[in-house]
Image (tube, grey):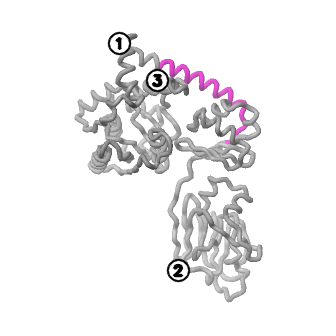
Amino acid sequence: MLNRFKKQLVQLGVTINDKILVAISGGVDSMVLSNLLLRSGLTHSVAHIDHHTREGQSTEDRYFVEKYANTNNLPFHIHNLVSKEASGNFHDWAHKERYRFFTTLGYDKVLTAHHYDDEVETIFINFLNGRSIESIPEINGVVLRPLLQFTKAEILAYAKELNIGYREDSSNQKNKYLRNLIRNQIIPDLTKVIDENVGSRLNALARRTREDQQLLQSLIEDKVVSEKQNGRLRLSIPQLQAHPPTFLYHVIREYGFGRDICEQIHTALPHKGATFYSENKMCVVADGYLIIDSLPQSWQPLEVDKRQLPLSVIINNHRFTLSIEDTASRLHDKHACTVPMLLLSESIIIRAWQEGDQIKPYGMAGKTKKLKKVFADKKIDIFQKHSLPIFTSNEEVIWITSLMSSDTFSVDKEGPFLQIVRITSL
């Protein structure tokens, strides 16, 4: 099994240089996946979700996984999900929240332990829910599933052979959940009535369907004018409106958007600002375009003591220099901001945009403008809005990177400004 697993990793493009995160529940599947990775020479981090269910058993799972991670010197990430925070179906909500957590931790690859039997069950579930007869994708963005070629029996045999410890989820035996009913009753009954190859036939059907979808996808892409850059997709709204919702579905399905949500997106195309989410992507209706990109990641503010100047900083993939110059340097530049040292507090805070932020734009005679309005006027989309560093001093905005500087901190103000702080975006 180990040699087959290593070949599977090569096919999926996993390398020793990748920063890898493994979703580990504590069950046999994920414990085997972690073991196989370690035996393949691939260290990784561990992510665990505590759903706070099963009368405390889920918390025991957490302690088990945390102990395993500590024993093997694996970085450990924990996320708590509480059912009362869910709106609608708890299982659907928890599923989305899990992947949202996994994909916002900043790893190159996120590995989950879905296997061959899971794939068969998923085909049944999708069919019964009227969705499709598609199976679980091996690759979905940064999410990879290297165990799809292995059956549950193979995984259990491997765990037994290597004496791998794992936790049993008692809820897996309760047939009130559809997946458990399919696993525990429907598939075994069909295997008895038809033959033992029911699973392989379903998988073959799913593969053929996937091939048909790939052909359809290529034909549709020839009809779409799109822009792809750094993982961001921009689609012409007028072009999408000229086709039915199913056309949109086949264009953006690879980003995790299902048929139902694509119908909602299609209806919302005339409404600028409408926003929709998949597991790890966000879709926004902008001026003339539908934009799909990764979910904006939160980042920590940076405090710069002005006594430490000059210096260079990198924050949220933006690089800046902060230098001290004389009063002769009073240039206004899109990519730079000059501020009198005496007008600054002891420190400059570089942070993300916050709701309610305001600025007194340079040259507007002290009038105040909300940053939200600035972004709208400059046609800055929601992704850029959350990534642009904002410079503040004493809780007042000094500069919106490469967009606008504050009149309050202008070097044109009267005063004995012996020193000027120049902030430059590189």
- The quarter of the rendered structure image containing the C terminus is bottom right
Mark 3 residue crowding within 10 angstroms, few (<14) / some (14–19) / many (20+): many
The quarter holding residue 181 reads: top left
N-terminal of the two: label 3 or label 2?
3
CB-based contact (under 8 Å), mark 2 and mark 1: no
Point out which mark residue 192 bears.
1
Q: Nearer the viewer, mark 3 or mark 2?
A: 3
The quarter holding residue 111 reads: top left
Residue interval drawn in magenta: 203-227
Q: Amino acid at mark 2?
A: Arg
Q: Which residue is mark 3?
A: 124
Mark 1 residue crowding within 10 angstroms, few (<14) / some (14–19) / many (20+): few
Residue 7 is at least partly visible in this image: no
Point out which mark residue 307 bears.
2
Residue at mark 1 to residue at mark 3: CA–CA distance: 17 Å
Give 384 or 222, whichever is nearer the viewer. 384
Q: Is residue 321 above or below residue 57?
A: below
Residue 326 is at least partly visible in this image: yes
Residue at the image position 60 percent from the left and 32 percent from the top: 259
Q: Amino acid at mark 3?
A: Phe
Q: Is residue 52 above or below residue 148?
A: below
Point out which mark residue 52 bears.
none
Q: Amino acid at mark 1?
A: Lys
Q: Secondary structure at mark 2?
A: helix
Residue at the image position 38 percent from the left and 47 percent from the top: 45
N-terminal of the two: label 2 or label 1?
1
Q: How many marks?
A: 3
Q: Nearer the viewer, mark 2 or mark 1?
A: 1
Q: Secondary structure at mark 3?
A: helix
Residue at mark 2 to residue at mark 1: CA–CA distance: 78 Å
